[in-house]
Amino acid sequence: MGDKITVPHILKMKQRGERITCLTAYDYSFARILDEAGVEMLLVGDSLGCVIQGGANTLAVTMDEMIYHTRLVAHGCKRALVIGDMPFMSYQTGTADALRNAGRFFKEAGAAAIKLEGGVAVQESIRAIVAAGMPVMGHIGLTPQSVHQFGGYKIQGREKNRREAVLRDATAVESAGAFAVVLEGIPQDLAGEITERLTIPTIGIGAGVECDGQVLVIHDMLGLFDDFVPKFVKRYADVKQTMLGAVKEFMVEVKERKFPAEEHSFK
């Protein structure tokens, strides 16, 4: 499988022009599969609020829940870089809270990095966390924890003033010491401009092909979650239909007394 992926490895991938792959994971079994496949980074996203917990957004996810799921993913990884997602109100209340909560991902969950949303507004928290020896991934553009401020999940950076604000956020994240930044829900040309400007890798989700890497929610790309499907999602498999078929076959065999057969029984 190769050597353990580290933050310096990710930075060198940008320097070499190698595209970076990232997927979300929320438990041990999925993490093992994605790690075996060779994905460089696994993000334990607060998106679990939607795809695991069934919420309308990510805002209700707690620190304890994020620590729990990050620990499960870390147990399943031998190679991938595991990134814990800082949930809503775990860092917005000040640098001291951001530092303390970031530390929990490393002490309690075995994460190798953390991610938090925002640019200029959180640069001091990023700087403090990095100064304490903890790698940080930024996240700008459409930041889901600000869904109510945006008035929904709307593309950011189309208007001139918003475009300039996203550019400022990108620069702020890099200057604060982040090793990478997620660009979500922004126009492709803006993502390309940011990618060219920054020395750290950009990881796109709904930001076009010019980014240094791409991330998707695993439940979206496998067709396991269809409550809503963003435009930027490509479904690489329809695992939901496969599961439905298997479960229905199991039900038929149980009702017809075909399962368990002799080979599944003890004597």
Image (cartoon, rainbow, N blue to C red):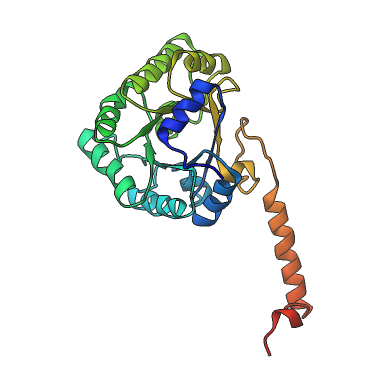
Q: Which quadrant of the figure contains the N terminus?
A: top right
Asked if residue 93 is positioned above or below residue 184 in the image, the reply reads below
- Judge left or right: residue 149 versus residue 247: left
Place of residue 95 in the rendered image (x, y in percent of width and height, measured from the top left): 22, 33
Q: Residue at x 40, y 53 (%)?
A: 71
Asked if residue 163 is positioned above or below residue 65 in the image, the reply reads above
Which quadrant of the figure has residue 258? bottom right
Q: Residue at x 52, y 50 (%)?
A: 31
Asked if residue 91 is positioned above or below residue 120 in the image, the reply reads below
Place of residue 163 in the rendered image (x, y in percent of width and height, measured from the top left): 46, 13
- Judge left or right: residue 241 versus residue 68: right
Place of residue 45 in the rendered image (x, y in percent of width and height, measured from the top left): 46, 42
Work out whether residue 143 or residue 76 is closer to the camera in this orientation and state it.
Answer: 76
Place of residue 147 in the rendered image (x, y in percent of width and height, measured from the top left): 44, 32
Tally of numbered tags:
0
Residue lying farthest to the top in this orientation: 160
Residue lying farthest to the left in this orientation: 96
Which quadrant of the figure has residue 259? bottom right
Residue lying farthest to the bottom in this orientation: 267
Q: Which quadrant of the figure contains the C terminus?
A: bottom right
Q: Is residue 134 visible?
A: yes
Q: Residue at x 67, y 52 (%)?
A: 240
Which quadrant of the figure has residue 143? top left
Q: Is residue 183 visible?
A: no
- Judge left or right: residue 12 versus residue 123: right
Q: Residue at x 38, y 45 (%)?
A: 111
- Judge left or right: residue 177 versus residue 27: left
Residue lying farthest to the front in this orientation: 2
